[in-house]
Image (spheres, rainbow, N blue to C red):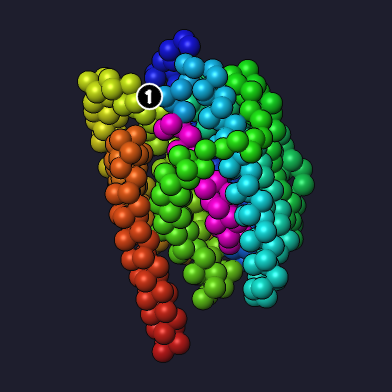
Amino acid sequence: MKKKSIGMNAFFNGLRSVLNLLFPLITFPYVSRVLSVSGIGIYNFSNTYISYFILIAGLGIATYAIREGAKYRNDRRKIEEFSSQIFSINMIATVIAYVLLFASLLIFKNLSNYVSCILIFSLQILFTTLGTEWIYTIYEDYAYITVRSIFFKVISIFLLFLLVKKPEDYLVYAGITVLAGVGSNILNFIHARTFIHIRLTFNTNWRYHLKPILVIFASAVAVTIYTASDTTILGLLKNDYAVGIYSTSVKIYQMAQSLLSAILLVTIPRLAFLWGQKRLREYSSVLAKVINILGILVLPASVGLIMLSREVILIIAGHKFLPSINSLQIISWAIVFSIFAWIFSDCVLIPTKRENLVLRNTLITAIENIVLNFIFVNCNNNLNTFV
């Protein structure tokens, strides 16, 4: 296989990250002014809620597939056998995720206000599985997924301005978001045949695959709890308005983080490949470059976002969302810690098969996060009641 340039990969993935950044930058200022704060709250709560089931369907497979598949990418027979087994496991997990989702909607009656929006977002579960983007990451082919991202995001922006006109259109906005994010994944699945032929198979080596997948999945669960439990707890203990205000600052934080992580994402398969081939000197060289580049970028980005938080919120969301300033200034510091944690987990520990350490660390931080969320949200409720 022709060796891909890390520089070109970083360019394409950076372009894709810029597109993912520009899409909410273009759409959110419009949507935040058309929809009510409560509508934004319902939208964000539903999106966060469905992320748990996307996680179940994903089962940590993408991370495992990139790490293991990178070793086989020059052997077509082995990579096809490996990929078919991984895809089959992924489809089984997807069915389980849908069963659990529908069961939760029947059991938890307080979700009735969110059901329609949740069901729209649930399309992401299937289409994420069919997208098989881990294949493109294994082969370090970011050009195709970047081009189709441009195409579908342009269509989505056009549909947004055409169809979202009033506060009740948050369901239409949810559908457009799904189209922009995963609508092209059917094309991904078809185009993946240019690399390998994937099929469903019952001849799966469960003993070999399942343990590392479940360890990575447990780590992913902990990370999701760490990153999404704040919005979920706010939605359960407070109201849609509080979720709308807080989730706006989270969205801005995620935009900055995704742009900075472009360099990091394209190096993960290369590092996994180099480690798998025992080319440790090259591995150390690439890792050092990533750390140095991100070390230069992340701190100025965090400080800049803190200093310009008011202006950023006014531009992106409008004056109705100015209460988001304080939360944005606080969580902006997390960019520094999250990027470097990402480097050491996905670029060091997982390629070297030390995912148990990642699991331990993320479990500890997830538990701390849930406890502190409940404490501070309840404290705020008590203060509001006292006042």
Asked if residue 13 can be seen in this view, the reply is: no
Q: In this view, does 255 lie to the left or right of 355?
A: right
The residue sitting at 55% across, 19% down in the picture is: 77
The residue sitting at 40% across, 68% down in the picture is: 370
Name above or below for residue 344 compared with residue 48.
above
Which of the 4 quarters of the picture holds residue 264? top left
| Image quarter hosting the C terminus | bottom left
Furthest residue toward top: 2
Name above or below for residue 142 compared with residue 375.
above
Q: In this view, does 246 lie to the left or right of 53?
A: left
Q: In this view, does 264 lie to the left or right of 323?
A: left
What x and y, as percent, mark residue 254? 45, 47
What x and y, as percent, mark residue 304? 33, 44
What x and y, as percent, mark residue 363? 35, 59
Asked if residue 275 can be seen in this view, the reply is: yes
> For the residue labelled by badge 1, is the local secondary structure a helix, a strand or a loop?
helix
Mark 1 Cα within 10 Å, few/some/many (few <14, many 20+)? many
Give yes or no for residue 56 being in the magenta stretch: yes
Name above or below for residue 215 compared with residue 129.
below
The residue sitting at 63% across, 28% down in the picture is: 198
Residue at mark 1? 273
Give yes or no for residue 372 being in the magenta stretch: no
Residues shaded magenta: 45-68
The residue sitting at 31% across, 61% down in the picture is: 364
* Residue type at the position of mark 1: Phe
Furthest residue toward right: 163
Main SS, magenta region, reads helix
What x and y, as percent, mark residue 249? 46, 56
